[in-house]
Amino acid sequence: MDRTPAGVVRWSLLDLAVLLYALIPVAWIAALSFKTPRTIPDGRFWPDEWTLSNYRGIFDNGDFLHGLVNSIGIGLIATLIAIVVGTMAAYAVARLAFPGRRLVIGLSLLIAMFPQISLVTPLFEIERALGLFNTWPGLILPYITFALPLTIYTLSTFFREIPWDLEKAAKMDGATPLQAFRLVIVPLAAPGVVTTAILAFIVCWNDFLFSISLTSSSRARTAPATISFFTGSSQFEDPTGSIAAAAIVVTIPIVLFVLLFQRRIVAGLTSGAVKG
Amino acid sequence: MTSGITRATAWEELGGGPGRASPSANRRSERRLGWWLCAPAALVMLLVTGWPIVYSVLLSLQRYDLRFPGRKAWIGFDNYGTVLTSRFWWNAFAVTALITVLSVAVELVLGMAIALVMYRTIVGRGLVRTLVLIPYGIVTVAAAYGWKYAWTPGTGWLARLLPAGNAPLTEHWPAIGIIVLAEIWKTTPFMALLLMAGLALVPEDALRAASMDGATAWQRFTRITVPLMRPAILAALLFRTLDAFRIFDDIFVLTGGAQNTGSVSVIAYHNLIGGLNLGIGSTMSVLIFLTVAVIAFVFVKVLGTSAPGTDAAGRR
Amino acid sequence: MAEIVLDGVTKRYPDGTTAVQDLDLTIADREFIILVGPSGCGKSTTLNMIAGLEDISEGELLIDGVRVNDRAPRDRDIAMVFQSYALYPHMTVRQNIGFPLRLAKVGKEEAHSKIEEAARILGIEPFLDRRPAHLSGGQRQRVAMGRAIVRNPKAFLMDEPLSNLDAKLRVQMRTMISRLQHQLGTTTVYVTHDQTEAMTLGDRIVLMRRGVVQQVGTPEELYDHPHNLFVAGFIGSPSMNFMPADITGEGLRTVLGTIPLSARVRRALEAHRAPSRVIMGIRPETFEDARLARHGDAAEHVRTFTGRVEIVESLGAEKFAYLDLEAEGAIDSAHLAEAFQGSGPVHRRAQLIARLDPRSRAHEGRPLELEYDPDAVHLFEPDTGLNLTEDT
């Protein structure tokens, strides 16, 4: 492509259009979160008066703090388990010949396209019977399940990109299959594992349906679900500012991940999706 | 020769052929390792989805309302009759289908445009690729509240652009439009990323050759780029269609399903949590699952989409 | 150091294809043996079976008299060099070479000295602390060799180790491998598709086609006494010239003229009950420019042939002349199609390649008189490809 001044201007304008597309709605929520209760109903984009009171408000609110702790805790545990379990399965699927391999691929494909709502009804009943309703494990379990197919796909693509010969070489050098996995494959797959972990965490962090359906109090309810229960500190107070502030708070971790790991996230999201 | 070996190993999984010597210690240990490595994942997936699916089919065959637990009974396919003759179900089904088709269609066009910008731009490529991920990553509920307030009269900057007295979220068609808008905004970047990966599959030389042959930019796009990207486009459409069909979060926040804007997921949720009617809720769950299966089947069998992770996609 | 015996080794896939059929081969201790053949001939499968990377369907594999069919690669004590080198990208050269020692739980001190020793032999000491990504192709190749020799295994297996190198480096590394093998005296099985590598490296060559061994022998045996059409076509560069020939009372009638049969050839043909129509093969080296009169007047049995030169390739030390035989119809034979796989088109018009002395005045578009020794021809049965001039 030629870097003529005209070309630079044209592409800059197109870039700008994409950036505005991505940023305006986020900027709007951010602007809303800094408005005082008096200026919220003015309908302007930027606040006339800036305040941090909305943020102070939500952090004084025990429910939202609980929600954040729940989101982080449940998200991290589910991600960790999904990664450990998924890495093992992805390696087996990508590399080993064993009867049942197709079954595992088929099963995860099935779950990847599974409508969550179809699980909510039976899980609601099962978890109440098992005493898992409104507990951390009650959410961790479905989160693991929905993070697993993603983990298995993304990681098996990473594993496939590691040359076969390396494993054969390890075998010839005297490694057991487990040693070949531990000493050769895992170190090489580490970047892929990090990427996958980020994607899996985003999946868990983003969930709303399971969280509002399978919890009944701040004991296990995650941040997104907590936001939807905001009513304002009194019946007459409008929760708009608090909700906007909370929305920004739950968005921050995602923005950080995106800024730090852009390349890897793109690679992870598109891996396996397109193979000519 | 290598590919022959790989194919043969795949065959062996299907039960081994005639005249095979007993597998060597090596092969046996490989099999054992494969099973052990997959066991935890398979177990979790089966326990958390397999068992509930079976359970939900069983529930759908019963009259089971938590408000009247005493009237629990097996009633065969009566629930299916109830749901499939219900105006609410078919309205929700139509709304879901409409939202799915509209948003996926717009996403494909817009996503392709964004993909081309991200792929071809000569300024600030990294910046564009980074910031476009923000809509993808943002919590759906958070974004949905942003759209809700933007269209709320008095509060919203977008509502202010409308003539006074308009409250779009309280009217059926405007509300659907806003739901589609929210859905498109959030998921187009994902579509764009998948399409961008597809663009990378188009060899530059083919495009250069086409321009030497006198093709215009538009002809290069329609005659070279799009046909070569076909697998990527189909995979992206499959993903997004299945995903759009289970739309819940946006509708829940924006309208709560009022003004007949509820999707199948939303009314199933209301039947369960609001109505506590497990029989009807499960019936809807099963029907949604079947619909999704049909969509996937059409994509894979009729259009020849290769889903990721399957052998068709994994083979190189 | 070890003797490797393959006894009726067969590799059959469940879909019915047979990659290797009933392979009998005894590889002597310290021997350098080459498995060669076109792609798909089963040479790599054979190597992988010796390595333990693939199961043996039938037959026995013995290393030092012990049956190892069911042993995992790590229990066979053999090292392998891969075409891709298969260096571990996350390890330094030192760690790469030391990996087999680490797995064998060799002590730190001992491992260190062994690694240094291997690096010294291969001349890679300066790179010991680099990662493979920062090495050139030739250096990577040597690291791969280092990883093989460091633990002093019973045998080396090499799978096309030089095919990723450029032509010049390939010749250098060929010499290095040859020297190293002599120095260490380790039994080596080397797979290649390149007949030049096979001819220059091996003590013995195993030439395979479609999973079946065609001939086993020293490079000279395969060159001078090919068992069949395939071997004749595969070994030698440029390839042997082939043309149809009819056996008549006066001799062989061919496009080169009628060639009298020597007593040796006549006896062999009778013993084989040869058909009247055969395929004649004659190596390009057999010809010489008649004006240079290499044979002089000493050999009155020398024949001459005059043809029009189409193309001359001058390589400095030698000249190749391509003569148009002015005859339709090249030889149509499956044996040859495979032997020539990928090495030049099969011409519809019969053509003859002659390898000449550089002083030859062969000139494009002009006639050239060639002389040759009629006793140097090979005759082949057209269907089976069997060499009728050899008493096998």
Image (cartoon, coloured by chain):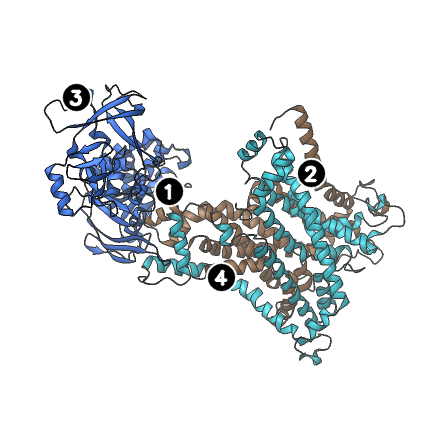
* Residues flagged by tags 4 and 3 on a common chain: no
- Per the image, the residue denoted by label 3 is C293
* Residue type indicated by callout 1: Ala
The answer to whether the residue labelled 4 contacts the one labelled 2, judged by CB atoms less than 8 Å apart, is: no
Q: Chain of mark 4?
A: A
Residue C86's disc is: 1
Q: Quadrant of residue C205?
A: top left
Q: For the residue labelled by badge 1, is the local secondary structure a helix, a strand or a loop? A: loop
- Does the rendering let one see residue A269? no
Q: For the residue labelled by badge 2, is the local secondary structure a helix, a strand or a loop? A: helix
* Residues flagged by tags 4 and 2 on a common chain: yes
* Residue type indicated by callout 2: Val
State the hue of chain C.
Answer: blue
Q: Chain of mark 1?
A: C
Q: Which chain is cyan?
A: B
State the hue of chain A.
Answer: brown
Q: Chain of mark 3?
A: C
